[in-house]
Amino acid sequence: MLEPGISLEQVRVVRRDDCINFLGADVRPSLSTPSMIYWMEICCRDAILPHVGEGNDSVGIKVSVEHLAATPMGQSVTYTAKLVTVDGRRASFEVEASDGAEVVGRGTHDRVVVDVSRFAARLRKKLEAKETAR
């Protein structure tokens, strides 16, 4: 059962595929905003997964995050997720990312608990409708 207060902290090392590299040769690759958000979402999912029941999981539905500072490739980032409200199947989190020197990102993230088999069936139906339309 989901209850406010559930939290999780995960440490990830910034890898090359987590980085932007389009600012030129003088700028070391650094953590991209999409990658930071991805790891925040994973932290939230992992925090509640043991509490959602067998056959269920959660999917992200809303993200509001500020990317506050750059973190170079190779450095560790600690992602923190704290469940603050539960409204039916909807779970709302406060999220933060810190690289040890400073907070590099913070914001909120909402997820909804889904029945995996029903979710998969809805996707199949949508794909089949697209194939039929061709």
Image: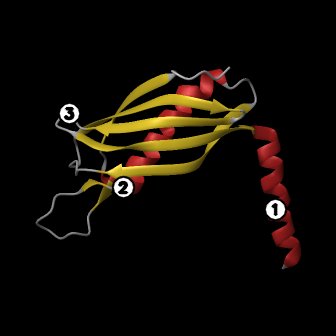
**Mark toward the start of the polypeptide (3 vs 1):** 3
Q: Residue furthest right?
A: 132
Asked whether, in this view, residue 132 is left or right of residue 33, the answer is right
At x 31% / y 56%, what residue is drawn?
Answer: 19
At x 36% / y 55%, what residue is drawn?
Answer: 33
At x 22% / y 43%, what residue is drawn?
Answer: 74
Q: Secondary structure at mark 1?
A: helix
At x 80% / y 63%, what residue is drawn?
Answer: 127
Distance between mark 2 and mark 1 Cα atoms: 30 Å
Q: Would you name the residue on which mark 1 appears?
A: 126
Residue 62 in the image: x percent, y percent? 56, 50
Which tag is nearer the camera, tag 3 or tag 1? 3
Asked whether, in this view, residue 26 is left or right of residue 78, the answer is left
Instruction: Identify the mark at residue 100; answer none if there is no mark.
Output: 3
Confirm or deny contact between disc 3 and disc 2 (CB under 8 A).
Answer: no
Mark 2 packing: few (<14 Cα in 10 Å), some, or many (20+)? some
Residue 108 in the image: x percent, y percent? 47, 43
Q: Would you name the residue on which mark 2 appears?
A: 33
Q: Amino acid at mark 3?
A: Gly
Asked whether, in this view, residue 134 is left or right of residue 79, the answer is right
**The N terminus lies in which quarter of the figure?**
top right
Q: Amino acid at mark 1?
A: Lys
Q: Amino acid at mark 2?
A: Thr
